[in-house]
């Protein structure tokens, strides 16, 4: 598990540590780690370090100081270092003095400095900054051709929300200090490869505000049959999805639940024949009332939003078992508020909206996706899985998981149906609803990477590779 802390918490933790360590010690520790990663990048890019050229983009404050001190350490390893001071009168005094002592230069020609670099360090702004890059800095960043290593975070990206509201640095890698910040999981695409340098503040941070599940944690929690299990004890998943118009949604959701190692899957709906044809192991009927006992329901994918769909939703919500409500089920709930009353508020529920579906029942997502998901979870009493490049999963009690996507291959028709089936299977196994949603998201993404293999893929292929994805996660957890 990786914890994530917001800017205010990080600054408060640093202030506590400042009281008991010598002045400048934390900055030098951070800068030394930054310089080491810069040297690694140089060696990988150019085959060596000595004589290579590094340009520092230096803003005011401590972030610029980190860059200047890193330049000092790089000079001591034979790297040619030139600093572009974007606010010369506000450059960090001790860092500037250290760079000069070690033979680093202050660039007179800013454009020439960025164009001649083998590597550029982005120390323009830090955790206190908000909003896009200012024109002068943005103009220089546009001229950079070398790889960029961001200092703590890419400048111009909001540290707490990951919002990019204008010109911003798109880094090849980011070295962050002390802990991960929200920007690193909500705007991972701008951060590049992320490296964490320990500067001794972890004990002061307290409990994390956000959590990223590791592959090992997901693999360790994934339900697999034991020697005393049978098809019922592993969890029976009910799928109420699809229609005559959209039978594929049912086929995909059912397939995902099966591939997730659910002990048994029961299907109810108009797509019973296509489901039986593709998945003969499924018990398929035409009606929720004829389905038999289940331990969770998935409702909504391809269901339709007419009277028939509304009646299916009503029966599912009244069943008294955990529910994953997706797609048309969310639209139905948003269209008539009284439908929420069909659900026992003590029964676990997972809602899986994309931004437009979210807006129908909870208002516009806005810039702060984490805050929006938290508010919706608290209001509905359900786990809210807000889909996006960084998927946010919020529980009613305030806990939040974030899954930063490593690719965009899952942006394909039917992908959400597969995710819903995965969540339903994990709910049926008895997993905590927040973890069921978070583990399903991670497995879904791993499956997307395996299915695509750097080329476009489809939801049907996602279903086929789910066992391989789960095996990958379990291998990460040490299972063989």
Image (cartoon, grey):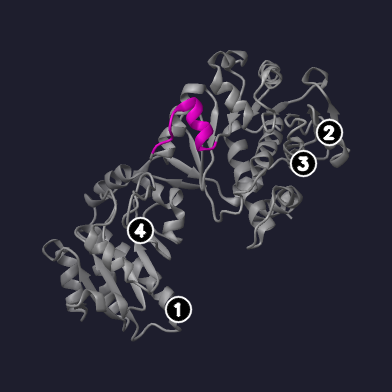
Q: Which residue is mark 2?
A: 231
Q: Earlier in the sequence, mark 2 or mark 3?
A: 2
Label 2 packing within 10 angstroms: few (<14), some (14-19), many (20+): few
Q: Earlier in the sequence, mark 1 or mark 3?
A: 1
x and y percent of residue 346 in the render? Answer: 59, 18
Quadrant for the C terminus in the image: bottom right
Q: Nearer the viewer, residue 176 or 480?
A: 176
Q: Which residue is mark 4?
A: 154
Do tag 4 and tag 2 residues touch (Cβ < 8 Å)? no
Q: Quadrant of residue 418?
A: top right
Element at label 1: helix
Q: Earlier in the sequence, mark 2 or mark 1?
A: 1
Q: Which residue is mark 3?
A: 255
Distance in Å between CA atoms under marks 3 and 4: 41 Å
Q: Earlier in the sequence, mark 1 or mark 4?
A: 1
Residue located at (43% from left, 74% from top)? 40
Instruction: Give the residue furthest to the left.
Output: 89
Do tag 2 and tag 3 residues touch (Cβ < 8 Å)? no
Q: Is residue 66 above or below residue 17?
A: below
Label 1 packing within 10 angstroms: few (<14), some (14-19), many (20+): some
Q: Is residue 169 above or below residue 404?
A: below
Element at label 2: loop
Is residue 160 covered in magenta?
no
Distance in Å between CA atoms under marks 2 and 3: 16 Å
The answer to whether residue 181 shows anywhere in this view is no
Magenta-tinted stretch: 354-366
x and y percent of residue 115 in the render? Answer: 31, 77
Element at label 4: loop
Q: Earlier in the sequence, mark 3 or mark 4?
A: 4
Q: Which residue is mark 1?
A: 45
């Amino acid at each position: 598990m990786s914890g994530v802390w917001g800017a205010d918490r990080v600054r408060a933790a640093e202030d506590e540590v400042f009281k008991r360590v010598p002045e400048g010690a934390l900055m030098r520790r951070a800068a030394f780690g930054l310089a080491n990663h810069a040297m690694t990048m140089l060696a990988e890019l150019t085959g060596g370090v000595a004589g290579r050229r590094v340009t520092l983009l230096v803003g005011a404050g401590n972030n610029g100081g980190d860059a200047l001190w890193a330049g000092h350490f790089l000079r001591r390893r034979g790297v040619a270092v030139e600093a572009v001071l974007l606010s010369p009168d506000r450059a960090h005094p001790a860092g500037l003095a250290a760079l000069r002592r070690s033979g680093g230069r202050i660039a007179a020609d800013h454009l020439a400095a960025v164009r001649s670099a083998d590597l550029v360090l982005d120390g323009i702004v830090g955790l206190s900054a908000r909003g896009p890059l200012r024109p002068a800095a943005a103009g220089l960043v546009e001229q950079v051709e070398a790889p960029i290593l961001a200092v703590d975070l890419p400048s111009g990206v909001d540290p707490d929300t990951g919002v990019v509201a204008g010109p911003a640095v798109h880094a090849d890698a980011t070295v962050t200090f002390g802990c991960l910040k929200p920007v690193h999981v909500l705007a991972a695409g701008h951060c590049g490869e992320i490296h964490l340098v320990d500067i001794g503040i972890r004990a002061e941070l307290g409990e994390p505000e956000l959590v990223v599940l590791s592959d090992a944690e997901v693999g360790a929690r994934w339900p697999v049959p034991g020697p005393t299990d049978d098809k019922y004890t592993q969890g029976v998943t009910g799928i109420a999805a699809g229609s005559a118009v959209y039978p594929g949604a049912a086929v995909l959701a059912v397939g995902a639940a099966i591939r997730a190692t659910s002990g048994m899957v029961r299907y109810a709906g108009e797509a019973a024949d296509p489901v039986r044809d593709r998945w003969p192991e499924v018990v398929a009927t035409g009606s929720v009332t004829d389905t038999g006992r289940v331990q969770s329901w998935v409702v909504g994918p391809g269901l339709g939003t007419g009277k028939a769909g509304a009646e299916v939703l009503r029966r599912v919500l009244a069943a008294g078992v955990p529910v994953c409500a997706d797609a048309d089920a969310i639209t139905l709930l948003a269209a008539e508020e009284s439908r929420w009353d069909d659900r026992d508020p003590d029964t676990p529920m997972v809602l899986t909206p994309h931004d437009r579906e979210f807006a129908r029942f909870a208002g516009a997502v806005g810039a702060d996706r984490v805050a929006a998901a938290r508010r919706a979870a608290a209001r509905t009493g359900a786990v809210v899985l807000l889909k996006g490049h960084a998927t946010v999963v919020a529980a009613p009690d305030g806990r939040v998981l974030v899954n930063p996507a490593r690719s965009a291959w899952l942006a394909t028709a039917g992908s959400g149906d597969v995710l819903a089936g995965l969540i339903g299977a994990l709910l049926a196994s008895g997993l905590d609803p927040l973890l069921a949603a978070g583990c399903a998201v991670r497995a879904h993404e791993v499956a997307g990477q395996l299915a695509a293999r750097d080329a476009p893929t489809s939801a049907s292929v996602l279903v086929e590779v789910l066992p391989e994805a789960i095996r990958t996660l379990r291998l990460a957890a040490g299972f063989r």
